[in-house]
């Protein structure tokens, strides 16, 4: 059942990306709530940001495209902090072998990134809720908690602003 929901969500992402202009806000799929532990030692839920635009970025330290887009995500984080226009949540795809909490924490600290990172142990959120087929993947959630847009692959600051602007 959970696997089917992930496949459905991925299909919804593809359809939404292809036909974004034709989809009304009410037709967008509602994102199920989830809770993950953060790099700050607290449990963070998507519902904590109800009424806000939320950008979710699925990533791992071993992924070269994830590392290349990290400065752009830091810019988005700084923009959100300045303007209050939304919230960025990194969702670190932890497998316990190639990617660990320690490797993620070290990467962020070594590179001076001040980003809220959620540990998706065994990629439960990435795989079962969103059906993320590869990294990086970025999802924009609108103020009603619905899937607004998604991108598979690296994304820049300007594209992120464009994605957010499409739902405001």
Image: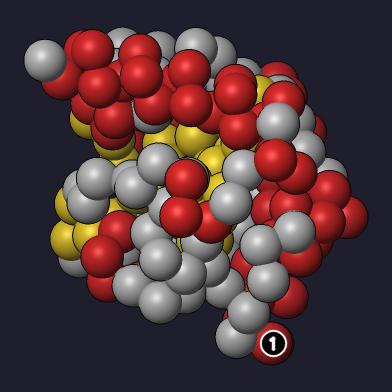
Residue at image location 77% in from the left, 38% down from the top = 155
Q: Where does residue 159 sit, x and y in percent of width and height?
A: 84, 48
Residue at image location 22% in from the left, 51% down from the top = 33
Tell me if 96 is positioned left or right of 53 in this view: left
Residue 12 visible in this rendered orientation of the protein: yes
Query: Please, which residue is most extreme toward the right here?
Result: 158
Q: How many marks?
A: 1
Tell me if 32 is positioned left or right of 148 in this view: left
Task: Classify the position of the C terminus by image quarter.
Answer: bottom right
Name the residue nearer the viewer: 24 or 76: 24
Task: Classify the position of the N terminus by image quarter.
Answer: top left
The picture quadrant where one finds residue 32 is: top left
Q: Secondary structure at mark 1?
A: helix
**Placement of 154 over or under 31, stated as above or below:** above
Name the residue nearer the viewer: 26 or 131: 26
Q: Where does residue 82 sit, x and y in percent of width and height?
A: 69, 87
Residue 115 visible in this rendered orientation of the protein: no
Residue at image location 40% in from the left, 77% down from the top = 51
Tell me if 37 is positioned left or right of 138 in this view: left
**Placement of 127 over or under 83, stated as above or below:** above
Residue at mark 1: 82
The picture quadrant where one finds residue 96 is: top left
Name the residue nearer the viewer: 51 or 72: 51
Residue density around tag 1, few if under 14, some if 14–19, many if 20 or more, within 10 Å: few
Q: Where does residue 66 sit, x and y in percent of width and height?
A: 65, 30
């Amino acid at each position: 059942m959970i696997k089917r929901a992930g496949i459905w969500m991925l299909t919804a992402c593809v359809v939404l990306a292809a036909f974004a202009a034709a989809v009304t806000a009410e037709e967008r799929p509602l994102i199920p709530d989830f809770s993950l532990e953060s790099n700050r030692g607290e449990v963070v839920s998507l519902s904590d940001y109800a009424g806000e635009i939320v950008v979710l970025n699925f990533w791992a330290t071993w992924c070269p495209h994830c590392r290349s887009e990290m400065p752009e995500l830091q810019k988005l984080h700084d923009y959100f902090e300045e303007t209050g226009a939304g919230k960025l949540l990194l969702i670190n795809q932890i497998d316990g072998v190639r990617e660990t909490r320690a490797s993620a924490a070290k990467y962020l600290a070594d590179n001076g990134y001040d980003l809220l990172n959620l540990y998706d142990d065994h990629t439960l959120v990435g795989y079962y809720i969103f059906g993320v087929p590869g990294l990086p993947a970025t999802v924009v959630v609108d103020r009603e908690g619905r899937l607004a847009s998604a991108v598979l692959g690296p994304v820049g600051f300007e594209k992120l602003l464009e994605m957010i602007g499409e739902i405001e």
